[in-house]
Image (cartoon, grey):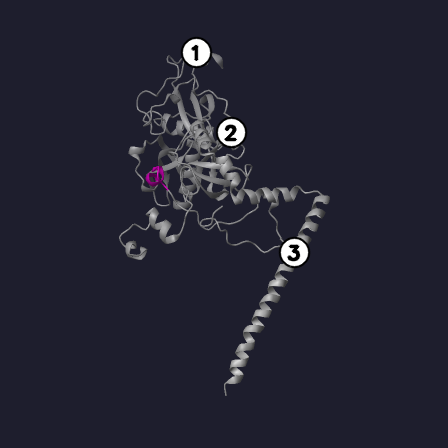
Amino acid sequence: FFFLMIRRPPRSTQGVSSAASDVYKRQVSTQSTWDFQWCQRRSMGKESKSQFSLKKVKQYILVGRAKPVAGQKEEPKVYRMRVFAPNTVIAKSKFWTLMRKQKKIKHTGGELIAIHEVIENPSKSVKVYGIVLRYQSRTGYHNMYKEYRDTNICGAMSQMYMDMAGRHRAREETIHIVRTCVVPESKIKRAETKSFTNGNVKFPLLNRISRPPIKKFKAFARAKRPTLFLQQNNSDS
Amino acid sequence: MCIRDRVSTQSTWDINYIREFMGFKRFVQAGRVAYINYGVDHGKVCVIVEVINSTRVLVDGPTLGVPRQVISLRRLALTDHLLKVAKGIHTKSLEAEIKKADLVKKIGESSWAKKLAAQKRRAELNDFERFQVMMLKRQKAYLVNKDVAQAHSKGAKKAKKAAKPKEAKSSQQP
């Protein structure tokens, strides 16, 4: 295994590259995320126990290539891909699907050099993530650009999958992510995202319900009648 | 000119319209102090640092025992207190702001906090203390009822007096 690692994987694929493998080339924000060293698994900062974020998917970097054939002059090119998947099994599957479709390298004829989970540091600031995707509807393929506010890319991705499922009945399998980026405030396209990015956003909370503070205290039957009306907006605390 | 005359010219979502017309006083906004109602950190106070979307916010509570985190608005109860901070404020700066505003003291003085403290104390009572509470309640009830009875009897007397001249008047008329 180790003699394969002598050659450092290139920063980007050469020649014609597909949209999928091009993901990291055309990112709006210039990050050093594609530095091989950065891709190493990093220790996660201490996240609070009650970290409330949808984490349907994780971010993986997969590096693979075709198996070297005896008598071949050149060493097979190494390809790197960023995949959003719930686990490594699906991540690998997605990797080989695209390798097969775009590079004509099958899983049987190729080898996975490395798979790393990209763990972002815990939430410190809210960002706007722009996601370009391609999904298959019942009648054809469509491209979409969607924006989500979140503290990390995986959260934004999860939001996207939920959103697509709800709005377009598009399941995870039919969605291909073309490109993701962190969108600076000036370049935000969607009105809803813009309105929440505004520093002066304000709204009251409506339809408050009273519920026990811990799931354990949730009772099927109670001696008292339920409180339907929480006086939370007008009265003083 | 009343508010209704102004309604047509103003945007329905103008915050002043909402405040005056709808009567809301507490808003989800950067700097709003909120109680966490549910989850691991329930009972603690935090400050809304940034609004993510209509369902989630980024909160932080440096000296209040709440780590910086994303939390659902369903888990929050807004208070009257509002810190004047810019959205996305860092933990250290927020800590300074909390100190400056003396938030811990202000929260402690609020009737909400006092009620919570009373509830907590009540839950911690031992059997003897519960007996004491019962005796004190009984004494209080006795004193209250005594006053009520007196006032009632005074009122009854007054009513009688008021009724007599009326009776006299009505009896005088043919």
Instruction: Establish whether labels 1 and 3 are both on one chain.
Output: no
Which amino acid, mark 1? Ile
Which amino acid, mark 2? Glu
Q: Residue B21 versus residue A194: which sits nearer the camera?
A: B21
Residue A139 forms part of the magenta stretch: no
First to last magenta residue range: A193-201
The crowd level at tag 1 (other Cα within 10 Å; few <14, some 14-19, many 20+) is few
Separation (CA) of disc 3 from disc 2: 55 Å
Which amino acid, mark 3? Leu
Of badges 1 and 3, the one in the foreground is 3
Indicate the chain on which mark 2 is placed.
A
Indicate the chain on which mark 1 is placed.
A
Q: Position of residue A225 (x, y in %)?
A: 59, 56
Q: Secondary structure at mark 1?
A: loop
Using the rendered view, name the quadrant where residue B7 is placed: bottom left
Residue A196 forms part of the magenta stretch: yes
Give the residue drawn at x 30%, y 21%: A15
Q: Which residue is mark 3?
A: B143
Q: Looking at the rendered structure, which numbered label has been put on residue B131? A: none
Q: Looking at the rendered structure, which numbered label has been put on residue A6? A: 1
Residue A54 in sight here: no
Of badges 1 and 2, the one in the foreground is 2
Instruction: Establish whether labels 3 and 2 are both on one chain.
Output: no
Q: Secondary structure at mark 3?
A: helix
Q: Residue B149 versus residue B135: which sits nearer the camera?
A: B149
Q: Position of residue B157 (x, y in %)?
A: 59, 70
Q: Eyeballing the image, is A204 above or below B46?
A: below
Mark 1 near mark 3, Cβ–Cβ under 8 Å? no
